[in-house]
Image (tube, rainbow, N blue to C red):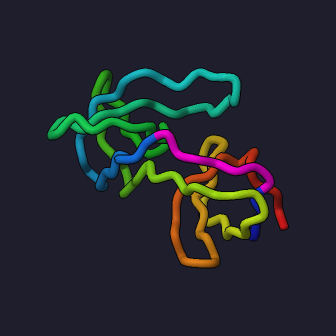
Amino acid sequence: MKYIVIKKHRTNYSDPITLVKGQFIIVGEKYIGPEKWDNWYFCTTSENKIGGWVPGQLIDLRGAEGIILEDYTARELDVNKGEKLVGLKELNGWIWCLRTLNSEEGWVPKENLKLE
């Protein structure tokens, strides 16, 4: 689907968590906030303790631990109002987007986008 950015977005995480299918993680707090982005968990890797938000649909929960069900990165895309993007996947209030200008990819909050 094609989108136009209606509100700029900047990431708060310069070093996003990147996970591979089958990787073990430590599952922390569930996100609760005014945006109502449901089903996100703050997870860390057991190897190097890098943390980030992971959609619950991608975690095989096993108490305080989990196994990742598919490759995933929490990379967010910095975007400016008026930019054109292609939405490739939607999860829990965020859309994985491709910037048509330079082929960069990352997550953008759905409320910052409008269908073109």
**The N terminus appears in which quarter of the rendering?**
bottom right
Residue nearest the viewer, comparing 84 with 34: 84
Report if residue 3 lies within the magenta region.
no
Looking at the image, residue 100 sits to the left or right of residue 43; the answer is: right
In the displayed structure, would residue 52 be above or below residue 73?
above
Residue sitting at the far left: 47
**The C terminus appears in which quarter of the rendering?**
bottom right
Q: Position of residue 13 (x, y in %)?
A: 43, 42
Q: On the image, which quarter does residue 59 sit in?
A: top left
The residue lying at 27 percent from left, 38 percent from top is 50
Q: On the image, which quarter does residue 21 sit in?
A: bottom left
The residue lying at 63 percent from left, 22 percent from top is 33
In the displayed structure, would residue 55 be above or below residue 89?
above
Looking at the image, residue 62 sits to the left or right of residue 55; the answer is: left
Q: Position of residue 108 (x, y in %)?
A: 62, 52
In the displayed structure, would residue 102 be above or below residue 91?
below
Residue nearest the viewer, comparing 31 with 104: 104
Looking at the image, residue 6 sits to the left or right of residue 107; the answer is: right
Q: Position of residue 92 (x, y in %)?
A: 62, 41
The residue lying at 51 percent from left, 52 percent from top is 76
Looking at the image, residue 4 sits to the left or right of residue 21; the answer is: right
The span picked out in magenta is 6-12
The residue lying at 52 percent from left, 65 percent from top is 105
Q: How many marks?
A: 0
Examine the residues drawn in magenta and state their main secondary structure. loop
